[in-house]
Amino acid sequence: MCLCDMLARLCKTTYPLQELLTRPLPEGVDPLRLEIYLSDQDFEKALEMSREEYGALPGWKQVNLKKAKGLF
């Protein structure tokens, strides 16, 4: 693998939902914040709400929702 490919993988900011639900996770992905790596479409599909609605929830509700959806 060339340096450009490695850099592109490390700089990647979004991943498909299925890729974040499998282990091992892609290199550089924070396992406690998987939702930030989802596209807006996958985010709404997985969590059944918009990022704005999710952000308005208290922290404990966000954690419970992520656990229920397998994103924690």
Image (cartoon, helix red, strand yellow):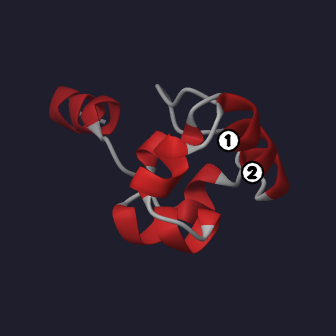
Corner quadrant of residue 2: top left
> 50 or 68: nearer the eye?
50
Where does label 1 land, which residue? Answer: 62
Where does label 2 land, which residue? Answer: 65
Q: Quadrant of the N terminus?
A: top left
> Is 35 situated above or below 58?
below
Q: Residue at x 75, y 51 (%)?
A: 65
Can I make out residue 68 in this image? yes
Q: Quadrant of the C terminus?
A: top right
Percent of width and height locating residue 30: 55, 26
Residue neighbourhood size for the residue with mark 1, other residues' Cα within 10 Å, grouped as few (<14), some (14–19), many (≥20): some
Percent of width and height locating residue 15: 43, 53
> Is 44 situated above or below 56?
below
Q: Rounded to the nearest whole Å, what is the CA distance between mark 1 and mark 2? A: 5 Å
User: Does residue 2 appear to the left or right of 71 in the view shown?
Assistant: left
> 2 or 37: nearer the eye?
37
> 66 or 55: nearer the eye?
55
Q: Residue at x 49, y 56 (%)?
A: 53
Q: Residue at x 71, y 52 (%)?
A: 22
Can I make out residue 23 in this image? no
Secondary element at tag 1: helix
Residue type, mark 1 in image: Gln
> Is 69 situated above or below 13?
below
Q: Are marks 1 and 2 in contact (CB under 8 Å)?
A: yes
Percent of width and height locating residue 28: 46, 25
Residue type, mark 2 in image: Leu
